Image (cartoon, rainbow, N blue to C red):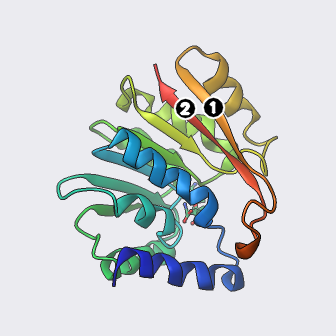
Amino acid sequence: MKPEEVLESIERVAPGQRWPIIGPERGEILDELVLKHKPSTILEVGTLVGYSAIRMGRHLKKGQKITCVELSENIAGTARSNFEKAGLSDRIEVVVGDAKGVLPTLKGSFDMVFLDAEKVEYLTYLKSVERLLHKGSVVVADNVRSHASEVADYLEYVRNSGNYKSAYRDFPVGYNVATANQGDAVEVSVKL
Ligand SMILES: C[S@@+](CC[C@H](N)C(=O)[O-])C[C@H]1O[C@@H](n2cnc3c(N)ncnc32)[C@H](O)[C@@H]1O
């Protein structure tokens, strides 16, 4: 299947399964950032069935890679099967475990990071991988409007630490009525 067909099939099933995928509206920002910054290495924290990873992974070239961290072994299995269907399993790998334990063990460097697991832990996640970021690395945090109080410490840090240039991208309710978008925002922070 083409990656787009796998994305569409997940979009169809997600509401009934109550899967909190980033979806097609906010998902476009992932496309935009991957096309703009051309990351060779991406870290995703919170993968669910692989929707956001497929969105990003379809723009990668052979040899470029996404490392996904997912808590649930069962869900990670579904994600791996979706990567296989989308023809992307050579560029997306899933590490199963609690991100708080996994992230401090990662090596290498990341050009882009997508945070989408426990909202209250975003700042812990970022600090655990900051040593693997470089000038120009892009960090994207989802659900920063719907979970504003949980991510307040994270937003304070990326906006005021002097380590990032950070921007809030809002996607209001009704942004795309056809897909019943509930509205939310993402924070995009570029490492200085
Ligand atoms: C919002 S969903 C991810 C959606 C996905 N990024 C997408 O847009 O298609 C959050 C995922 O994070 C996982 N998760 C929750 N806590 C976690 C943790 N401590 N470590 C790793 N993954 C976690 C959940 O199992 C769930 O699959």
Q: Quadrant of residue 109?
A: top left
Q: Is residue 91 visible?
A: yes
Q: Is residue 99 above or below residue 192?
A: below
Nearer-the-camera pick, 37 or 82: 37
Task: From the viewer's perspective, tell me whether residue 8 is left or right of residue 43.
Answer: right
Residue 138 is tagged as none
Task: From the viewer's perspective, tell me whether residue 189 is left or right of residue 106.
Answer: right
Ligand 1 quarter of the rendering: bottom right
Q: Amino acid at mark 1?
A: Ala
- Which element type, helix, strand or loop, lies under badge 1? strand
Q: Quadrant of residue 76?
A: bottom left
Expressed as whole percent of the image width and height from the top left, the position of residue 170 reads 72, 45
Residue 189 is tagged as 2
Expressed as whole percent of the image width and height from the top left, the position of residue 74 reads 49, 78
Q: How many marks?
A: 2
Q: Choose the circle earlier in sequence order: 1 or 2.
A: 1
- Which element type, helix, strand or loop, lies under badge 2? strand
Q: Residue at x 76, y 34 (%)?
A: 152
